[in-house]
């Protein structure tokens, strides 16, 4: 009898084996979930910073600027490169330089209200939104209006440093802020385009 009791007591407990198997399965499931989340994050990062942007290097060219009278004029720029994406006009960023003859006209261009540079995709290394914002705050850069309501509700803002380096981006203007929320445009804004 004693031998039988010892034999039964020293045998494997089925419940312990089941709990161990469940623990292993839980670790496998947890590791799988983390792996899937990591892959999804990497894919989103790639799409956001690489796939959805086209980066173009043009060199010398022209860009539209808005004068204080409200007219648009093409201005000569050099070292032009820009990033943009077809999915949204807000993806636009540009870096370039203003030659001396264009810098001499800087006071002719309309000041841009509430300039707020936004972060560029990682491959577009020339555009440092934080540094541009700091330059504007210090007064070592001036924000002027490139285009307005092209497309509707979007302004192209250009920040020009004292050295002639320039950076452009798109941001929602006061017309877009109201209309995009489904409200009528504020006074002084053109009527929004009709959608079918």
Image (cartoon, rainbow, N blue to C red):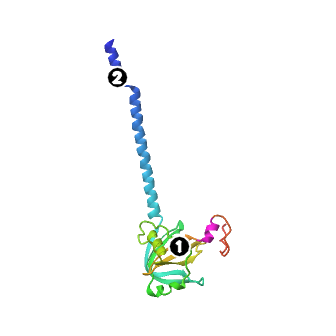
Which of the numbered marks, if any, corresponds to residue 98?
Answer: none
According to the picture, the residue beneath numbered tag 2 turns out to be 11
Is-magenta flag for residue 84? Answer: no
Dominant secondary structure of the magenta stretch?
A: helix
N-term-proximal mark, 1 vs 2: 2
87 and 182: which one is in front? 182
In the rendered image, the residue lying farthest to the front is: 138
Which of the numbered marks, if any, corresponds to residue 115?
Answer: 1
Vertical arrangement, residue 118 with respect to residue 3, above or below: below
Q: Which residues are magenta?
A: 173-180
Q: Position of residue 12 (x, y in %)?
A: 35, 25
Q: Judging from the image, what secondary structure is the residue with disc 2 in?
A: loop
Q: Judging from the image, what secondary structure is the residue with disc 1 in?
A: loop
At horizontal 42% and vertical 35% (from top left) the residue drawn is 22
Disc 1/disc 2 C-alpha distance (Å): 76 Å
At horizontal 32% and vertical 13% (from top left) the residue drawn is 2
Q: Position of residue 87 (x, y in %)?
A: 53, 65
Quarter of the image with the N terminus in it: top left
Q: Position of residue 82 (x, y in %)?
A: 46, 73
Q: Quadrant of residue 175?
A: bottom right
At horizontal 40% and vertical 41% (from top left) the residue drawn is 28
């Amino acid at each position: 009898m004693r031998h039988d009791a010892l034999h039964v007591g020293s045998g494997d407990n089925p419940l312990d084996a089941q709990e161990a198997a469940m623990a292993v399965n839980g670790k496998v499931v947890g590791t799988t979930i983390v792996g899937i989340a990591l892959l999804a994050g990497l894919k989103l990062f790639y799409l956001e910073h690489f796939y959805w942007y086209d980066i173009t290097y043009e060199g010398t060219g022209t860009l539209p600027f808005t004068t204080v009278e409200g007219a648009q004029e093409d201005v000569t720029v050099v070292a032009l490169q820009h990033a943009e994406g077809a999915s949204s006009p807000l993806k636009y960023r540009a870096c370039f330089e203003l030659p001396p003859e264009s810098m001499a006209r800087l006071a002719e261009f309309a000041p841009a209200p509430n300039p707020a540079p936004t972060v560029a995709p990682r491959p577009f290394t020339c555009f440092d939104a934080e540094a541009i914002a700091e330059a504007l705050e210090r007064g070592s850069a001036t924000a002027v209006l490139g285009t307005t309501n092209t497309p509707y509700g979007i302004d192209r803002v250009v920040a020009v440093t004292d050295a002639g380096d320039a950076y452009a981006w798109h941001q929602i203007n006061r017309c877009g802020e109201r209309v995009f929320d489904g409200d009528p445009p504020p006074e002084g804004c053109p009527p929004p385009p009709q959608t079918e």
